[in-house]
Amino acid sequence: MEANLAKYQIVKQYILDQIEKRIYQPHQLIESELELAEKLHVSRITVRKALEELVNDKVLSKKKGVGTFVNPLPKYLGFKPGIGFTSEAKNRGLTPSTKLLRLAKVAAEEEQAVDMQINVGDPLWLVERIRYANNVAVSYELEYFDYHLVGELTEDICRHSIYEHLKEKGIEYEYVDQRISAIMADESSSKHLNIPIGSPLIDIKNIAYLKNGKPFNLGFALYQTNSFHLMHTVYR
């Protein structure tokens, strides 16, 4: 699967694997950029990009003049549910794909307006999709994006990664409020995810915020549990 990854993603995956195998321990100083570059046969620029992303993801931290350290992370590393599906899948060596069911510009109703801090009737993009990892249907998503903040969306953008498209425009989430619950698959969701009616689903509602605290994305996602589960480590 590494053949499908960019070189910096291979470096990221190597570091994540070392953490998962407990070769890298919490607070441990890892190899230098030069040592990682030589070990993995990549450039220092490639290593630096991988380290920067892992620092941004709070996996690692840097101390000036000392080096890069492993943060005390939960031992279970999985998808960030409902956020940036494409990048999360790629980071784990999986091939993401998307089936676009609907893209439409709609007027915000009262509930959406409250969640997104806009007025009733303001324009929103509605995006309905099924997300796949290695051709397995993992989640069904119904999302709303603030038209005034994100601008135009096309079917091609929505068949790939909307978040990666927005990142290129300088639009990134600072934090996300999540509500996570469990439900049973009905006839519609069972068809979307190719699972039996009554199968357990993880039901997630996300509201993604910009750095200034303004919501730009309201999303609802159903994850099938044959290929996806949540695990959490609690520290004393």
Image: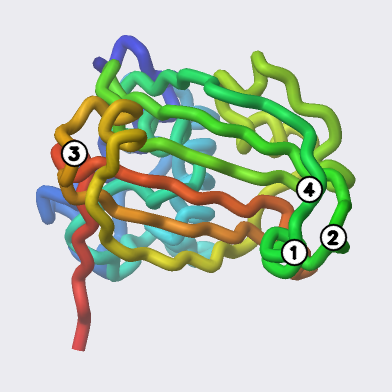
What amino acid type should be assigned to the residue bearing mark 1? Glu
- Position of the N terminus by quadrant: top left
| Residue that mark 2 sits on | 120
Q: Which residue is mark 1?
A: 110
Disc 4 versus disc 2: distance between alpha carbons?
A: 12 Å
SS category of the residue bearing label 2: loop
Q: Residue furthest front?
A: 187
The residue at the far bottom in this view is 236
In percent of the image, x 48 and y 61: which residue is there? 62
Q: Which residue is mark 4?
A: 146
Q: Report the Cα–Cα distance between label 3 and label 1.
A: 31 Å
- The answer to whether the residues at label 3 and label 1 have Cβ atoms under 8 Å apart is no
Residue type at numbered disc 3: Ile
Q: Position of residue 210 (x, y in %)?
A: 73, 59
Residue at the (13%, 52%) spot, across then down? 23
The colour scheme used here is: rainbow
